[in-house]
Amino acid sequence: MYRLFTTLVCSVLFLLTAAAAEKPNVLFISIDDLNDWVGCLGGHPQVKTPNIDALAKRGVNFTNAHCQAPICNPSRISMLLGKLPSTTGHYFLAPGFRDVDVTRNSDTIFQDFRSHGYYLSTMGKIFHGAADKASFDHIERGRGWRRPKKKLHYTVPGSHPAWDWGEVDVADEEQRDYKTAEWAAQQIPELAKKDEPFFLAVGFSLPHVPIYASKKWFDLYPLSDVKLPPAPEDDLEDVPTIAVDLSLNLTAPRDLWMRESGENIHAVRAYLAANSFVDHLVGMLTDSLASSEAADNTVIVLWSDHGFHMGEKMKWAKRSLWERTTRVPLIFAGPGIGKDGVCKEPVGLIDVWPTLSELCDLPLYNGLDGSSLVAQLNDPAKPRERPAITTFGKDNHSIRSRDFRYTRYREGSEELYDHRTDPDELKNLANDAKYKEEKASLAAWIPKINVEAVPGSRGSDSPLYGEGEGLQKAMKRKP
């Protein structure tokens, strides 16, 4: 009996170990403030991102993917907790999810994978702030150069101290994001040798401000050739006052300064250069994986927390419910995923957790607000019923379908754009009667649960949170 019992125990342990070994690893790549200025998304005609483009060719590129909040903290909380901002009340840059009772004890996607036998390791910006200790077996502290002691540029009074850009005489190898990529690239072959599957989360800070890069990346974009994005000065005349007040903040005088000083083209060049630098770092990770024992058994997901305006709609920031801020790169590649797939269906970062769970054959965590994208990984043309939802502050929601964006603000004002004919969202169709049914269809997806902002939220008390005096005051261009 003892021998029989021992044999059974050993058999069970063997089967459990074998099952764990068969589960795919996960390489989870986060990029901060990267909008759709990526080659495979076509957001800017000059951008050079060969490594991200190659990754898209290896898997499925979701070209209509959107964040759930247009600023760092609530976007990352939403994605990593699997809950919409309207469900948790995390709408702004503070507080963190462990700092308030409503989400203090919430599990993250990383805790879910740890509980199913994965080894979790991380370096770089994954959360908005320090890495969550409960989420990882190993946290590697960031290191390397990020910004000089003195800014290269000074814009309008009141601009964030990090609002700066330009070419820096600092070797790539000494910069923080490079150090992160270097460490992760060294870890991949070591993690591949472990008995348990690994989940490696790697976060890059660029192209978040300050937007710096070395000469080699600036040289890719000669100044005389750089193209500015479309930014007609009358673009905001048909949008609601709250849309301007909510999103513009101090970027209105900043835009005026950028145009009049001629620095707009230099900032655009810096953003393009930083995107190419980060793309190189992504290549370091994918090259390391390709040469490791885990090459054929690792799911890669690459994403950005939100986009960024580079002068469009008179903005040099995020914090809006327009396309340039909500649209983000989202790419899946790896075992069981088709190659060279392009999915145009609306999806959200909220869908990443359930997708990875299904790809890794884990039970679906209870209560997630997103849904799996595996059906689209198998058939990128397969329609999705649900749209992508982005929220900025309580009761301000933007609903993105395949062809339209509908936005309703807390005081009832609206925007509607037809992306089939107006990809830059220049003509607000909300008051056009022939789109009444389209508006109603999209409005049906506005979240029914809209909880109050969590205690300690920063942003809801701002005088520009829907309480300003609109375009004429903000822009100071009309009497």
Image (cartoon, helix red, strand yellow):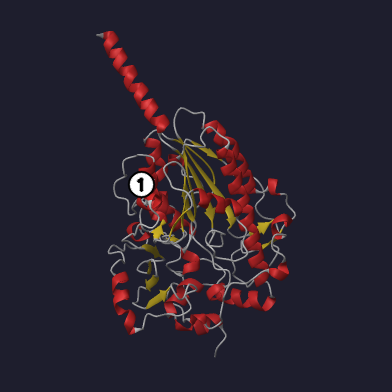
Q: Is residue 214 visible?
A: no
Q: Nearer the viewer, residue 112 or 215?
A: 215
The image position of residue 56, as x and y in percent, is: 51, 52
The residue carrying mark 1 is 106
**Mark 1 packing: few (<14 Cα in 10 Å), some, or many (20+)?**
few
Front residue of 342/414: it is 342
Q: Residue furthest right?
A: 169
Question: Residue 333, can we see it?
Answer: yes
Residue 70, x across and y down, in percent: 46, 63
Q: Residue at x 53, y 32 (%)?
A: 293
Q: Is residue 16 above or below residue 217?
A: above
From the viewer's perspective, tell me whether residue 8 is left or right of residue 392.
left
**Residue type, numbered disc 1:** Ser
Q: Would residue 122 be found to the left or right of residue 453 on screen?
A: right
SS for callout 1 = loop
Where, quadrant-wise, is the N terminus in this rendering? top left
Residue at 35%, 44% in the rendered image:
358
Q: Is residue 307 above or below residue 5?
A: below
Residue 40 is situated, as x and y percent measured from the top left of the image, at: 54, 58
**Quarter of the image where the C terminus is located:** bottom right
